[in-house]
Image (cartoon, grey):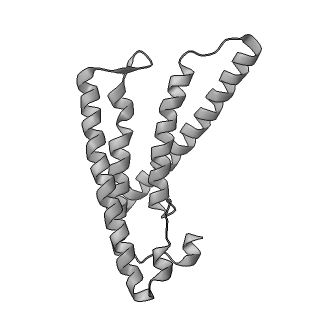
């Protein structure tokens, strides 16, 4: 299996997880609203699960946005710089973003380790660290993508819009 096919498989996995989690969130929230309004009852575990799914969808969405270079970007300086300086400004921003994301990945990995030691549970039975693994994985993936984007040219104005 070539590295290109592995990367394509990972991209499909990210996209698929994002779609499944979004659908699950919509169905679960709708069921909860329906049950509360009609039966004055609800699923006790749905609210904590929805909070976990929000974390997962946020991290997966950020990973996909970074992959496609559609992440949040405040880009005032490059419009003011001469064209020959834009590549250096772009590379600096990418490198800085990579360092920050990799630092957050390291810190979130430490956090997950502390959660493992404490034995915290989510939904009364799932170890919290398993659910929280998305944080170091997500930030590492984002940091890696920023690092790989260092070799790419800055996106054109058409790509940004």
Residue 123 position (above or below residue 151): above
- Place of residue 154 in the rendered image (x, y in percent of width and height, measured from the top left): 44, 76
Residue 131 position (above or below residue 156): above
Residue drawn at x 29%, y 27% as measured from the top left: 115
Residue drawn at x 32%, y 60% as measured from the top left: 98
* Total numbered badges shown on the rendered structure: 0
Which quadrant: the C terminus? bottom right
- Place of residue 42 in the rendered image (x, y in percent of width and height, measured from the top left): 64, 15
- Place of residue 4 in the rendered image (x, y in percent of width and height, measured from the top left): 37, 62
Is 87 displayed left or right of 24 in the figure? left
| Residue 26 visible | yes
Task: Locate residue 33: give its quadrant.
Answer: top right
The residue lying toward the viewer, choosing from 103 and 22, is 103
Residue 82 position (above or below residue 45): below
Residue 51 position (above or below residue 92): above
- Place of residue 83 in the rendered image (x, y in percent of width and height, measured from the top left): 44, 87
Is 151 displayed left or right of 156 in the figure? left
Which quadrant: the N terminus? bottom left
Residue drawn at x 41%, y 81% as measured from the top left: 86
Task: Tell which residue pokes out farthest to the top in this image.
Answer: 40
Residue drawn at x 36%, y 63% as measured from the top left: 146
| Residue 1 visible | no
């Amino acid at each position: 299996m070539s590295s290109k096919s592995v990367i394509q498989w990972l991209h499909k996995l990210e996209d698929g997880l994002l779609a499944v989690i979004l659908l699950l969130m919509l169905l679960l929230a709708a069921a909860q609203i329906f049950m509360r309004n009609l039966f004055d009852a609800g699923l006790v575990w749905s609210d904590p699960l929805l909070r976990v799914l929000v974390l997962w969808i946020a991290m997966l969405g950020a990973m996909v946005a970074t992959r496609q270079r559609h992440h949040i970007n405040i880009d005032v300086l490059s419009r003011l710089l001469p064209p020959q300086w834009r590549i250096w400004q772009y590379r600096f921003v990418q490198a800085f973003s990579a360092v920050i994301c990799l630092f957050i990945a390291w810190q979130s990995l430490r956090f997950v380790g502390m959660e493992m030691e404490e034995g915290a549970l989510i939904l009364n039975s799932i170890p919290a660290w398993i659910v929280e693994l998305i944080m170091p994985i997500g930030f590492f993936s984002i940091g890696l993508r920023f690092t790989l984007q260092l070799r790419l040219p800055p996106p054109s104005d058409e790509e940004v819009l």
